Amino acid sequence: QGASKHTVRSYRDTFILLIDYMNDFQGIPVDKLFMVNLNRDVILSFLNWLQDNRKNCSSTRNQRYAAIRSFFEFLERKDPTRLATWQSIRSIKSKKTPVSTVNYLTVEGIKCLLDQVPTNDRHSRRNLTMLSLLYESGARVQELVDLTPSCLRLEKPALVRLHGKGNKTRIVPLREQQVDILTTYLDENRMNTPSQSERPLFFNSSGAKLT
């Protein structure tokens, strides 16, 4: 399906939880679990268990259900003998979630935040570079830590290439001030050579990619 590793991990975790639920609350251990044991009532009960016992919020419940729904959509084509059961599971309604207002900082607030970052050592200067690039590009944290020097173009027109959710890539232009910060960072860490182009742009004290 071309799903990202994060989506695959989320789907995996959903079915681990479902197997645990079937064992602990339905009394069916994994070695005796068959597809015939799964129906609309069981899946509904599992989703309610996520909220009532595990205290998952509605959005997490919906995320788990999305994985289950996708699986039973697959089964509709692979095992049509139980098509009505699979369709009934896929007809479960997602919970409505409140739409919160997006909060933001003013330009002055961002400047104040960045001014608090010390620059007296390499670690601090790395943090300032990360924070300023997050603000400049609107990158997600995962997109930031996935960056390598090859994702940057610091000649005019300067840009950063971000690889995001759904394996989608987008190009974000960079202002001159951000280019200066990145250039200084690359020079200090000796990352401005072709041999360093595929290493993590931001790394920990061991030189490994940040989590």
Image: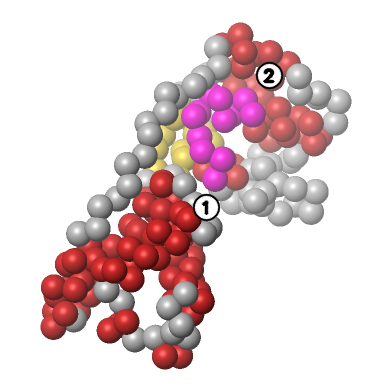
**What x and y, as percent, mark residue 73?**
22, 67
Query: In the figure, residue 189 lies in which quadrant?
Result: top right
For marks 1 and 2, give the one nearer the viewer.
Answer: 1
For numbered disc 1, what is the local secondary structure?
A: loop
Instruction: Look at the numbered discs 1 and 2 and tell me whether their residues touch, using CB distance below 8 Å.
Output: no
What amino acid type should be assigned to the residue bearing mark 1?
Answer: Lys
Circle 1 crowding by C-alpha within 10 Å: few under 14, some 14–19, many from 20 = few
Q: Circle 2 — which element? A: helix
Residue appearing at x 66%, y 24% in the figure: 181
Query: Residue at horizontal 80%, vertical 36%?
Result: 123
Q: Residue at x 50, y 35 (%)?
A: 139
Comparing 197 with 62, the one in front is 62
Disc ID at residue 158: none
Residue 183 seen in this snapshot:
no
Camera-side residue: 113 or 16? Answer: 16
Residue 56 lies, in percent from the top left, at 49, 52
- Which residue was labeled with disc 1? 55
> Which span of residues is magenta-colored?
131-142
Q: Position of residue 98 (x, y in %)?
A: 38, 34
Q: Position of residue 161 (x, y in %)?
A: 46, 38
Residue under circle 2?
113
Q: Is residue 66 above or below residue 161?
A: below
Amino acid type assigned to the residue bearing label 2 in the image: Leu
Viewer can see residue 115:
yes
